[in-house]
Amino acid sequence: MTGTEFMIIRENADIKIIDVKTDLSSYAASDLRKVLEGLLSEKVDKVVVNFSEVNHINSTAVGTLVGIAKRLRQNDGDLKLCNLASTLTRTFNLIGASSVVEIYESEKSAIAAF
Amino acid sequence: MEKTYIELKVPSDVYYIEPVRAFIGKLSETLKFPKKRIADIQLTLDEICSNAVYHGSKCVTCGIQLRISVDSHALEIVVQDKGGKGPHDWLTPGKLAEIQSKRSPTGERGHGLYLIECLSDVHKLQANAIGGTDVTAIFYRDGQTEKG
């Protein structure tokens, strides 16, 4: 496992899974961006972000995920999200980002979707 | 209930938004807002403070000021900044309309003001006397206005 104090990176075959261990306000959003950009620079193209331990996300973090998803798709990869609390899904829906980033109920279904 | 005020001054650094968000969450819980509404209040505060730090502050020590007032009808949050580095024109109605019209779900930025508008019962933006912006968000306590 690699990552940072609040972002643990695991592997499942060719898919990288990030366990986010903190709420995502602007400060933690910059950490998330660094971790995701690190994976991009390593040529990783399939990423799942697991939100099971996250209770809050702001628009900066949502924007980061949208941007990374678009960049991964340029390389025929993708970013998928899973285990979002209803308040988080609502934020994605309000912004309209759920039409851009795929959200799954479980990690298993997110992985199976690749 | 008589109107009461709480004032906080925090450095213009996103690092300090998290403890402020935790504080407003606890206060909203004490005021018996529903759980879902507490999440709305916390997100609104996060977005306002993030904007104040990123766009309304020249330096970390400039700081942003929060004035939170409570009465039997509402929780009101006012976040005051001192103005950013660039020409401070993002406040004007024309500029605001431009930001809103350019907002795209596929965009990485520009969603903060939209969320503030969606989640609060009332929101206001006003130029202040110290060259910055006062952003106000009001949440009614009557339980009749839960959004979404």
Image (cartoon, grey):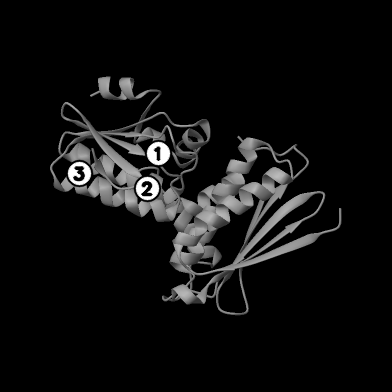
Q: Which mark is residue A47?
A: none
The chain to which mark 3 is attached is A
Amino acid at circle 2: Gly
The chain to which mark 1 is attached is A
Residue B19 visible at all: yes
Q: Position of residue B65 (x, y in %)?
A: 60, 69
Q: Position of residue A91 (x, y in %)?
A: 49, 39
The chain to which mark 2 is attached is A
Query: From mark 1 to mark 2, how far is it between C-alphas?
Result: 8 Å
Cβ–Cβ below 8 Å for labels 1 and 2?
yes
Check the image and report above or below for B93 versus B47: below
User: In screen coordinates, is B118 left or right of A98?
Assistant: right
Circle 1 residue = A97
The residue closer to the viewer here, A24 or B94, is A24
The residue closer to the viewer here, B122 or A105, is A105
- Sequence-first tag of 3 and 1: 3
The residue sitting at the left extreme is A43
Cβ–Cβ below 8 Å for labels 3 and 2?
no
Check the image and report above or below for A61 versus A86: below
The residue sitting at the bottom extreme is B130
Q: Nearer the viewer, mark 3 or mark 2?
A: 3
Identify the image quadrant of residue A112: top left
Circle 3 residue = A39
Amino acid at circle 1: Ala
Quarter of the image for the C terminus of chain B: give it: top right
Q: Describe the element under mark 3 as helix, strand or loop.
A: helix
Identify the image quadrant of residue A53: top left
Q: Which mark is residue A63?
A: 2
Graded by Cα atoms within 10 Å as few (under 14), some (14 to 19) or many (20 or more), the crowding at tag 1 reads many
